[in-house]
Image (cartoon, helix red, strand yellow):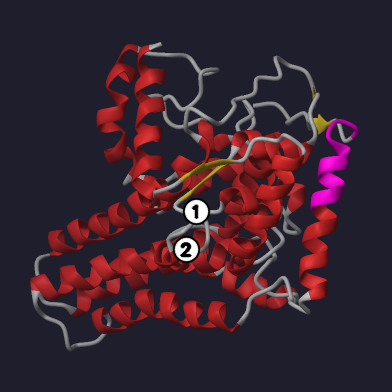
């Protein structure tokens, strides 16, 4: 693995669109005297999502639970809490959009470490690679899944991919399970070779030390201590931990995949070049999609990430504002003839994602 070659965009193309859009969004916050960070609604959601994980965990670490089925239910709820923390709290915090206080962002972003992931490698994959090079072949790891899946027409097609629209859902459920096994270790070593560790302030040795420490903490609180406290067979805990991560992984995948891997979004292959002849913001519009924009419940539960277009344009704005600024983005895109991809419902977005999986598996 060689050091990554940074790719540049052409700011002259579509400059008027990006300048106008940025100006209008800034004006929205200024004219309404609104902070771009978390509001009261966001803070209430934070308490709810954190409780959804740590209250069940607290019961598991007490002596009050000795039933197999109650234990399983608590782990299931923890899976929902893990997804909730990932989508609604740590995502904003690790983008620096939760609070103007960096310490608050770091603390809330670090919640990922306690639910099985590792915040530094997540930021490198998500903030650096995915957001900078969305749907760019060889750069965006979100469209470079394990070999049994094919998310981009620029990736090699294998015979097994013919059936990926049927079996992909199982592998989606393994997303956070990979967090608690080898993924973070592999990423840390890979990112060192790619030369992007400098986006974090810590050295490789210190990052590795913290990674090992938090994995030990996670396994202790999520598996070892419950096994010692609850009087049921050990294998139930293995089953339940797998189940709760499968629930969390599937939810996360079902939110993120329809945002970039659908027929309407574009996939870019630079063919070795270190520049993309496109405006960065227009590139984000072409490679990203929204879904279910009218669903208030979904908007609240998944951290506003049904407005992925707005998130990719303004990752430094807390998600509670996406619905309001989406009107500005949509109207400006129409004015400048820039695509604004959006599906009316969540299930329609999933159907189109499935359609592309099937197409990529057969062509």
Q: Residue 264's spot in the image, x, y percent? A: 53, 30
In the image: residue 312, left or right of residue 54: right
* In the displayed structure image, the side of residue 147 where residue 141 appears, left or right: right
* Quarter holding residue 54: bottom left
Quarter of the image holding residue 150?
top left
* Apparent side of residue 284 relative to residue 259 in the rendered image (left or right): right
Q: Is mark 1 on a helix, strand or loop?
A: loop
Magenta region: which residues? Answer: 12-21
Residue 78 location (% of width, % of height): 31, 69
Closer-to-camera residue (323/226): 323
Residue occupying the point 41% across, 41% down: 349
Looking at the image, which residue is at 72% across and 61% down? 316
Determine whether label 1 and label 2 are within 8 Å by CB.
yes
Q: Which of marks 1 and 2 is nearer the N terminus?
A: 2
The chief SS type of the magenta part is helix
Q: Name the residue under label 2.
A: 299
Q: Residues within 10 Å of mark 2 (few under 14, many from 20)?
A: many
Quadrant of the image containing the C terminus: top left
Q: Distance between the residues labelled 1 and 2?
A: 6 Å
297 over 348 or under it: above or below: below
What SS does tag 2 mark? helix
Q: Is residue 65 visible?
A: yes
44 left or right, relative to 191: left
**The quadrant where residue 3 appears:** top right
Residue 266 in magenta?
Answer: no
- Of residues 338 and 154, the one nearer the viewer is 338
Q: Mark 1 points at which residue?
A: 306
Q: Position of residue 314 (x, y in %)?
A: 71, 55
């Amino acid at each position: 693995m060689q050091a990554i070659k940074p790719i540049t965009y052409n700011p002259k193309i579509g400059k008027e669109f990006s300048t106008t859009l940025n100006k209008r969004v800034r004006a929205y916050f200024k004219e309404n005297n609104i902070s771009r960070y978390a509001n009261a609604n966001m803070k209430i959601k934070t308490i709810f999502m954190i409780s959804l994980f740590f209250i069940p965990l607290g019961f598991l670490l007490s002596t009050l639970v000795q039933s197999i089925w109650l234990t399983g239910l608590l782990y299931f709820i923890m899976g929902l809490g893990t997804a909730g923390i990932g989508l609604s709290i740590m995502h904003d915090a690790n983008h620096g959009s939760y609070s103007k206080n960096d310490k608050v962002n770091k603390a809330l972003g670090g919640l990922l470490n306690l639910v099985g992931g590792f915040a530094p490698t997540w930021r490198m994959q998500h903030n650096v690679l995915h957001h900078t090079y969305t749907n760019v072949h060889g750069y965006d790891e979100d469209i470079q899944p394990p070999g049994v899946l094919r998310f981009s027409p620029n990736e090699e097609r294998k015979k097994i991919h013919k059936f990926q629209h049927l079996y992909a859902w199982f592998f989606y459920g393994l997303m956070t399970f990979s967090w608690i096994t080898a993924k973070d270790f592999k990423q840390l070593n890979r990112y060192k070779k790619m030369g992007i560790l400098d986006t974090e302030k810590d050295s490789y040795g210190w990052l590795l030390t913290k990674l090992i420490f938090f994995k030990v903490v996670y396994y202790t609180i999520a598996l070892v201590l419950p096994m010692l406290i609850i009087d049921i067979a050990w294998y139930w805990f293995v089953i339940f931990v797998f189940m709760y991560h499968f629930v969390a992984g599937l939810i996360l995948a079902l939110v993120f995949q329809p945002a970039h891997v659908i027929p309407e979004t574009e996939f870019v292959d630079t063919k070795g070049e270190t520049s993309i002849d496109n405006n960065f913001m227009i590139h984000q519009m072409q490679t990203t999609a929204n879904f279910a924009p009218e669903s208030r419940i979904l908007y609240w539960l998944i951290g506003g990430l049904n407005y992925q277009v707005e998130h990719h344009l303004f990752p430094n704005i807390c998600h509670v504002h996406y619905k309001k600024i989406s009107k500005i983005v949509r109207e400006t895109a129409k004015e400048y003839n820039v695509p604004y991809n959006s599906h009316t419902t969540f299930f329609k977005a999933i159907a189109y994602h499935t359609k592309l999986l099937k197409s990529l598996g057969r062509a």
